[in-house]
Structures are given as C-alpha cells and as structure tokens.
Image: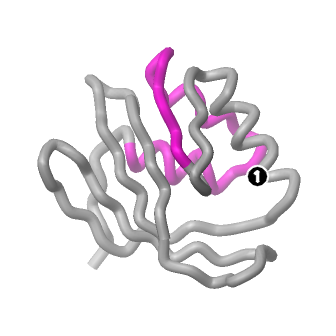
Amino acid sequence: MPLTLPAAINRYFTTDSISSNDITQHFTKDAIVIDEKQTYQGRDAIRQWKADVTTKFTYRSEPFACEEIDGKTIVTSKLTGNFPGSPVDLRYIFKIDGDKIAYLEITP
C-alpha cells in the first residue's frame, strides 16, 4: 500500500529525488532546516545546504511511515546512497505553514 503524505511533504520528497530541481520552492521564505546539528534559515541557506549535500553524495530517500504528533508531521524514510553508513532510516520532522514547509529537522 503506497504511503500518503501531506501535499507539501510529498512535493519535497519528489523534488529531492531529482537533484537538478530547487527544493526551496516548497519552503516558506524564512523556513528553518536542521540537518546534522547544523541550522539553515531562509531559502538561500537552504538552497546552499541542499547544493552541498547533492555535490558530495548521490542518494535516494524512500519514505515508509508517517505520523502526526503535536502539530508536526514525522516521516520515516530509508536513505540509501554513496555516503558513510548507507543505508540508514532517518526521521524528517516537518511543520507546515499553508502549503509550504516552515520547518524541517532531519534526525537519525
């Protein structure tokens, strides 16, 4: 059975799977991303974060679980690629504002 994700989150994962696409279109202007204990705020910082990641690694993210807790959407996804420790299950913690992502934290 396919996993049904909220529209903004589905767009994020779909766009992220195509490295040439700019995922920042799915974020609010002042969105925050936290990944590997680093914080990126605003579309320019998020664009640079994603460019750095896709330059270093080739990867694929396959969401397999989704739950809502305290106004946050938590998606668990299997990440596979050419990075140390692959594959790994990661938790993507989203806060949505309208039809955009306002907050994303990626944790092991």
Depicted 56 relative to depicted 38: above or below:
below
Q: Residue at x 41, y 65 (%)?
A: 91
Quadrant of the rendering where the N terminus is positioned: bottom left
Q: Quadrant of residue 8?
A: top left
Question: In the rendered structure, does residue 21 fall within the stretch colored magenta?
Answer: yes
Depicted 103 relative to depicted 73: above or below:
above
Depicted 76 relative to depicted 51: above or below:
below
Colour theme: one colour
Residue 71 shown left or right of residue 94 in the figure: left
Residue that numbered label 1 is attached to: 53
Residue 33 x/y as whole percent: 52, 39
Residue 99 shown left or right of residue 68 in the figure: right
Question: In the rendered structure, does residue 35 fall within the stretch colored magenta?
Answer: no
Count the labels in the image. 1
Q: Quadrant of residue 22?
A: top right
Residue 86 x/y as whole percent: 68, 82
Residue 101 x/y as whole percent: 40, 33
Q: Residue at x 87, y 51 (%)?
A: 55
Depicted 51 relative to depicted 53: above or below:
above
Residue extending farthest front: 37
Q: Residue at x 79, y 52 (%)?
A: 54
Residue 34 x/y as whole percent: 52, 45
Q: Quadrant of residue 77?
A: bottom left
What amino acid does circle 1 point to?
Val
Residue 49 shown left or right of residue 57 in the figure: left
Q: Residues within 10 Å of mark 1 (few under 14, many from 20)?
A: few
Q: Residue at x 70, y 43 (%)?
A: 50
* SS for dot 1: helix
Residue extending farthest left: 70
* Highlighted magenta segment, given as a residue range: 9-34
Residue 79 shown left or right of residue 10 in the figure: right
Residue extending farthest right: 55
